[in-house]
Image (cartoon, helix red, strand yellow):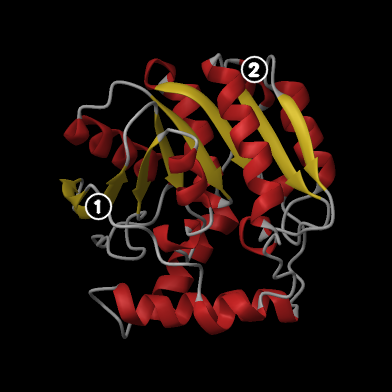
Amino acid sequence: MDHHDDDLRKFEAHGAPPLPAARDEGRVAHEGAEIWYATFGAGLPVILLHGGLGHSGNWGFQVPALLKAGYQVVVIDSRGHGRSSRDERPYKYELMASDVLAVMDALRLKKAAMVGWSDGACVALILGMKAPDRVTGVFFFGCNMDPSGAREFEPSPVIDRCFARHAKDYAELSATPDQFDAFVQAVSLMMKTEPNYTAADLARTRVPVAIVQSEHDEFIRHEHASYLASSIPGSELITLPGVSHFAPLQRPGQFNSVLLAFLENIHS
């Protein structure tokens, strides 16, 4: 039976399933930060970029599915998230995108598919726009590319449970476990002021892109997802029914089937 956790009670209590044993893991020093990564399996490379306040362990349902399909998987903790450190400069999506390229360089990966969730989706699409020679395609789930795409925040029990899990994980993984509140404030400032890309910026994208939007996304306007898909040449819009911004955790089987179909298509 497919895993269902629509209210995120299981995620709050236990987190996502643990990642499998890594083939390799380490840290890459880049721009004042130590960026943690782990690699799994062999084959065509897929890089998973998690959402704001989260970490790579949130991909616990996706890594095994990708390995079973024969891909090499790379997970990266964004600067200041999970096991990665940061300096005092403000969070910036383009800075985090440069961190991904630094990890790719350290791993000698010339090119990879980018799978992004929320903030990670923004980072993935920036890479698709600005470093297309390093990107085979972008799976963009649940994010905006300018401020008009964000919905007004409305608290909910599901969001509260996700936030509670993030707080627990931060305390366990971070080198600064007592600084969660400051971490949230710094990331939230980035989310309020970025990204700021225009339709003309999006139109210059030349890699395959899937804009994936959940039916009940708490943070991103449906109209914005449609706008992104219409602005990015050759992109497709995919709606995931019955789920929210947390679809990879709520109904991973549904999410994974769409992800695997996209990867198969761009590599065929």
Q: Nearer the viewer, residue 252 or 96?
A: 252
Instruction: Name the one closer to the observer, 184 or 106.
Output: 106
Q: Give SS at disc 1.
A: strand
Q: Is residue 233 visible?
A: yes
Q: Earlier in the sequence, mark 2 or mark 1?
A: 1
Labelled disc at residue 35: 1
Image disc number at residue 203:
2
The x and y percentages for residue 255 are: 67, 48
Residue at position x 27%, y 50% in the image: 37
Image location (x, y in percent) of residue 194: 55, 48
Q: Is residue 55 visible?
A: no
Q: Amino acid at mark 2?
A: Ala
Q: Dot 1 surroundings within 10 Å: few (below 14), some, or many (20 or more)?
A: many
Q: Is residue 53 above or below residue 114?
A: below
**Quadrant, the N terminus:** bottom right
Residue at the outermost front position: 1
Q: Residue at x 67, y 41 (%)?
A: 257
